[in-house]
Amino acid sequence: MNIKRSIVLRVRIAFVAVALLAGAIFYKIVHLQFVEGEKWEAKSESINFQYRQVSATRGNIYAADGSLLATSLPFYRVVMDPIVAKEEVYRAGIDSLAFLLSSYYRDRSADTYKRMITEARTTGKRYLILNRKQIGYQDMQKMSQWPIFRNGRMGGGIIFEKVEKRYRPFNNLASRTVGFLNEDKYGVGIEYSFNEYLEGKNGRALFQRIAGGSWKPVFDAEDVKPDDGYDIFTTLDVNIQDVAESALLRQLINKDAEFGCVIVMEVETGHIKAIANLQKNKSSYGYGENYNFAIGDQGLTEPGSTFKLISIMALLEEGKIGLNDIVDTGDGTFRFYDRTMRDVKQGGYGKITVQEAFEKSSNVAISKLVDQHFGHSPSRFMAYVEKVGLDQPLGFQLRGEGAPYFKKPGEKYWYGTTLPWMSIGYESKLTPLHTLTLYNAVANNGKMVKPMIVQAIAKGNAIEKKFQTEVVKKSIASDKTIKALQQLLEGVVNNGTAKNIFSGDYKIAGKTGTAQKLIDGRYTQRYYTSFAGYFPADKPKYSAIVVIDSPKGFNAYGGDVSAPVFKEIADKIYAQDLKLNKKTAVPTYLAQGINEFPFIQAGKVDELQMICNKFGISNHYNGQGDNWVKSVPQVKSIQWKSNPTENPTVPDVSGLPLRDALYVLENKGLRVVYQGKGRVKNQSISPGTPVQQNYVINLVLG
């Protein structure tokens, strides 16, 4: 009996416990539903529904002629909500859809695609990535017409998730100047400096959280559409940029140099037409655009002899010297306190004029003159540096501009030797852009303009901001001084350290620069070589600077290393610019209306004679042997003029077709690079120049 009562008691206790538990559960359900319902409903919505950012389309970057330098191309990831389509729509289209997906992606069979979609539909999966490969806009348009997909997002469950990628039609052309912007909003170049305009304003849209942690967009009346970014219109010229990069790269490889940069600027406007920066890759072979040495801190260095332009300008402005004054350089050495200044030429130049001193880039002559006239008051010399603004940043449009460095008289590190060494480009630091701005001012008859690389910011046809040429200094010196400086710069190319780039087609003015590199506090036998100048010198349109750091081999000076690159760039720009390039002279016989002669310029005499004889054209040659000739049209005949190629110098190949020019030049051991079609119009190395094996010669055909 006691056992029976015990069992009954336990059953009753268990029943009461279950009843109480059930009551508590029922109470909790009622409480959650009616008392805390709004709270948990709001929490559920906050977890499963969110307003998320919708990125704006980034603006484009254009060259001066409208060529596209960078743009954002839309790509799409194909996603599907399999349960949206009605049963009859799904059954009618799944086989065709699976076949089309398999044919397009070529990674799965049609049966596999059908099984994947059907399983997702059966299990209620709301977010199915059909393929992770991104598609373009045109393919997206085609897919939107496929079975099931053609019913749209609400009727077929198709979702094209937009993913934008930055695309450069010219690949790596001007890559460092165009720049980039990473996910942390850090970058370089135009992309970084003008990001506030390019990025636009992001919008927002309602998204629903679905299985797998993915988010699916949901239409909502409160969605805010993104405001796309502005377009940036630069001053860059893609043709000049390509020429600059190609010429620089060839010389860097040829000299096994560490890095180099080129800037080409329009004299009157200050528009940058090209900026090229190439540095030897540390982890791989070749060169790449890893840093903007043209404007950045790492490009700050002692400029060398290109700075002598300021020294001469200061002397001329003070009325201390004339170009024909004599300066005694002695044996090429001169002692300032405890240091000895030396000229490159062993034994020195002796007594020379100021003009010759500049043309030959005599360190002794320039430093003696500056010390003699400014040594008692170095602050007067520094006043000329400050007058032209070389001691301050230019306020260039790209971020990261390097700030020039100059010692100041009276400061701790100003010594008695500071002024003489500063006068020839040491104990100070400038970027190539600062040096070019100075030379551009001389080319511009004294007017200094601020370099600019962006000329407008716009969206569609509406211009948001336009940048005009800014005059920094109306004149950096008197008209008399500017004329003298122009004469000196032309003399450097005609008679001085850059006479190897003299051109008979147009005039070049400029100055070579060679500075020993200071490493660990000691000057080494590694050099920073440069050439800054402008062309055509009689009516300047372009200025440019070429810098090549640590070239290897003999003759590692600015005139031998950087000046030829300047010449190559100038030749190609001159050939391409119809406003600069004179039209090919019309032969006399054509001008006189005698049209029976073919347009013959140059070639092999036996071949040309054969052609003329076949057409019954009178021609005469007084030379002997199988020689190369040029044509000299007479009234009713052609006279062949000998054009010898046997001498150990660079031959004249103007007028030759490419085939013949290649034959002549490559037999001389020259490496030929050419552009254009037709006959040779210009050659980068002047005829008569001593041949150097494996030297690169550039031909412009036309």
Image: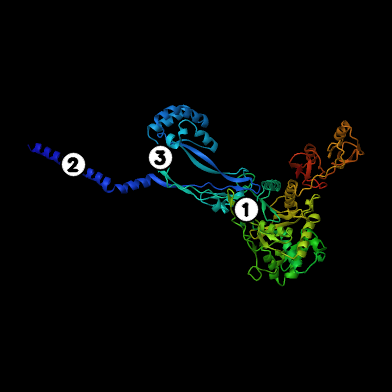
Per the image, label 3 sits on a secondary structure element best described as helix
Colouring rule applied to residues: rainbow
| Amino acid bearing label 1 | Val
**Residue located beneath label 1 in the image:** 454
Specify whether 551 is left or right of 484: left
Q: Position of residue 173 (x, y in %)?
A: 64, 46
Give the CA separation, mark 1 to mark 3: 46 Å
Specify whether 460 is left or right of 254: left
Circle 2/circle 1 CB separation < 8 Å: no
Disc tally is 3
Query: In which quadrant of the rendered image does the N terminus lie?
Result: top left
- The answer to whether 67 is drawn above or below residue 418 in the figure is above
Query: In which quadrant of the rendered image does the C terminus lie?
Result: top right
Per the image, label 1 sits on a secondary structure element best described as strand
**Residue located beneath label 3 in the image:** 212
In depth, the one of 360 and 214 nearer the eye is 214
**Residue located beneath label 2 in the image:** 19
Q: Residue furthest right?
A: 622
Per the image, label 2 sits on a secondary structure element best described as helix
Q: Position of residue 672 (x, y in %)?
A: 75, 41
Give the CA separation, mark 3 to mark 2: 39 Å
Give the crowd class for mark 3: few <14, some 14-19, many >=20 residues within 10 Å: few
Task: Point out the frontmost of discs 1 and 3.
Answer: 1
In depth, the one of 493 and 472 nearer the eye is 472
Give the crowd class for mark 2: few <14, some 14-19, many >=20 residues within 10 Å: few
| Amino acid bearing label 3 | Gly
